[in-house]
Every structure is written in C-alpha cells, then in structure tokens.
Image (cartoon, rainbow, N blue to C red):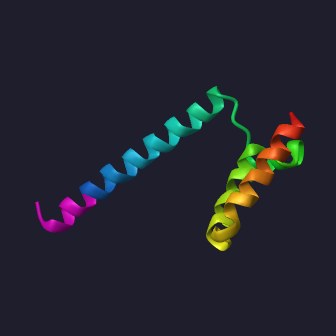
Amino acid sequence: MDDKGIINIRQYQIDATLEELADNVYEGCKKIDLRVYAHQLSKYGQPISKILNDAWAELFENPENFADWEKQRIVEINASL
C-alpha cells in the first residue's frame, strides 16, 4: 500500500471516530434533557450557560475588574433563587 492509501485509511478512521463521538455526545445531551443555547436564552433570559459565557468574555476583556464582576453576578444569581 502506498502513502496515499495509508493517508486515506487514517482519514477514514478519524472521520468514523469523530462521527461516533458526535453521536455519543448527541445521545448524552438528549438523555440529560439538555436544551439548545438559543432555547435557553428565550426561555430563561439569563441561564447559567449565558452567565458562564459572559464570564469568559469579561475575564479576557477586563481581567483587573473580573473579581468584582463575578461577585455581582453571584449576588444576582442568589437573588433570583
């Protein structure tokens, strides 16, 4: 078998592995009743997933004030419970 044939076999194995991984992740998400991010936003407004995404953005954009930002979000989360 030439190098091109080996590369094709490896690519097939990678594609098959990624497809199996995607299927497993999808089935796992269904089992825990995970909702699409857009659905979470429309239903809950400020779901934890959005707050976490916002936290990463805040940390990278404004690291010196992140601790204060984080404390405020915790106060807001606690108030909403």
Foreground residue among 55 and 41? 55
Q: How many marks?
A: 0
Residue 57 position (above or below residue 31)? below
Foreground residue among 22 and 13? 22
Where residue 49 sits in the image (x, y, percent)?
71, 47
Left or right of 46 on screen, residue 71: left
Q: Residue furthest top?
A: 31
Where residue 65 sits in the image (x, y, percent)?
70, 67
Give the residue at x 75% y 52%: 71
Where residue 6 sits in the image (x, y, percent)?
19, 60
Where residue 61 sits in the image (x, y, percent)?
66, 73
Foreground residue among 75 and 49? 75
Residue 68 position (above or below residue 25)? below
Give the residue at x 85% y 46%: 76
Q: Residue furthest left?
A: 1
Q: Is residue 6 magenta?
A: yes
Give the residue at x 65% y 28%: 32
- Corner quadrant of residue 54: bottom right
- Corner quadrant of residue 21: top left
Give the residue at x 88% y 38%: 80
Foreground residue among 10 and 71? 71
Task: Give the position of the C terminus as an image quadrant.
Answer: top right
Magenta segment, which residues? 1-8
Q: Is residue 16 magenta?
A: no
Task: Give the position of the N terminus as an image quadrant.
Answer: bottom left
Q: What main secondary structure does the magenta stretch of the protein show?
A: helix
Left or right of 18 on screen, residue 14: left
Q: Residue furthest bottom?
A: 61
